[in-house]
Amino acid sequence: MAHLMPPFRSRPAHHLFCSSSVLLLKPEMQSEFLSLLFQQQLEEEEDETTHRNLAILGVLAAGIADSQSEHARRRNPSRRYLTRPQLMPDPRAESPWVRLWQGQEDRAFITTMGFDVATFRFILEGRNRFADIWDNTPIPREDVSSASAPRPHTRSLDAAGALGLVLHYLGSAIHEVQLQQIFAVVPSVLTRYLKFSLHILLTTLRRMNEARIKIPSNAAEYEELSALITARHPLLEGAFGSIDGLSLAVQVSEDPELENATYNGWKTDHRITNVLMFSPKGTIIDCVLNAPGSWHDAHTAKPIFERLRSDVPSGFYVVSDTAFPRGPAAIQGKIQAPMKGGERIPADPVQQEQAMARNRQLLSYRQTAEWGMRIMQGSFGRLRVPLPISNSDARQELLEICCRLTNVRAICVGINQIRSVYLPTWKASEDDRLWDELGNMLFGEIRRVDRVARFHVVPVA
């Protein structure tokens, strides 16, 4: 059987020379010389061991680094993005967005962004509109002075592409990697352009009358809105709008105080609370946005209660559901809702019938607030994704943009369920009986899907 021999380790020539020559030395010098030779040999062996151990550690470190890199590539979601070689080479010349923009088709624009071509251009073009601000404002960057001159021709997207990017972002819940593919931009450019474009869009909308969020300022405007409602619901004289709360999901904060403030026990989730008031024209005329989810609607709606007290003339009111607070005694009668179960009704049969008839109309019109909430979440898919918790100002801006765009879409595009019901262009030529029967047919469905229907009073047949 063959035996494995330890590897032969040759010694340097001077070792052999010194070992053979030690006998030539004087006896008194032999011990000193051998001591020095032995010490030198130990040092060389230690150096060799150290080098071998360092080499082994280097191999192990390289293996660990490769393993960690492979694990990050497979597991880390932040690594899942596209780089320039995987995207179309020129975002201005060829991309899915460029093809959509060149087509100029209303159907494609409404499907992807919620606005037709004319309304898109209305927001984009003109003095102090989106394109004007985009072309004349430098994009904020840490490595570039804020006083530097803008260079719009060197940017990956022009003004139309930037507006299309932000409307795609707001109108859907798609991942950013899909926006990369649509607009052919890398992640850093996408993040920077989104932040910049959202700010420009909000500035543009604040200057547009069509995007205005404002409660009526005089009695004539209240009477106009009330007339639209009483045309469908004659017993609701004085009603000029509907109001309700909108709860939206938000990310969980690591700050215990903020985490506790956003937790909503009713929904057992972290939320933010908003209160919106809708007119029969389908527009938002008042709102409170971005309140902590732990706040009750009565606390959130305090600014609206104050405006109802100070600005709304006597005799006018908004309609809410039974769960929404009616406010303090100072605004008694300015928020009205259907009757709750157990509420007293007149004993006289005639008065009872009148009360029940008005209650049915209150319930029917109250549904417009539900339509408005569905319009907000249906039109802006970004609101269905948990909103960022780290930046309250950015969240406030995003919510305000969505509210103002809702008004622009209702007025300019006309795609709005409330507006289509209460502002029909062909109602004057139709038989009034048809409208009454239509209301009766819808009433059963409204009651069936109403989340607070159990609190409503229903007359017994």
Image: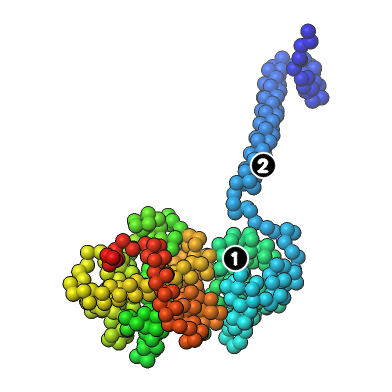
The kind of residue tagged 2 is: Asp
Corner quadrant of residue 261:
bottom left
Tag 1 residue: 191
Image-quadrant location for residue 12: top right
x and y, in percent, of residue 15 in the image: 77, 23
Q: Residue at x 75, y 72 (%)?
A: 93
Q: Is residue 192 above or below residue 333?
A: above
Q: Are marks 1 and 2 in contact (CB under 8 Å)?
A: no
Q: Is residue 185 visible?
A: no
Dot 2: within a 10 Å radius of its alpha carbon, few (fewer than 14), some, or many (20 or more) residues? few
- Towards the viewer: 282 or 119: 282
The mark found on residue 66 in the picture is 2
State the count of labels: 2
The numbered mark at residue 26 is: none
Judge whether residue 9 can be spotted in this image. yes
Q: From the viewer's perspective, tell me whether residue 82 is left or right of residue 430.
A: right
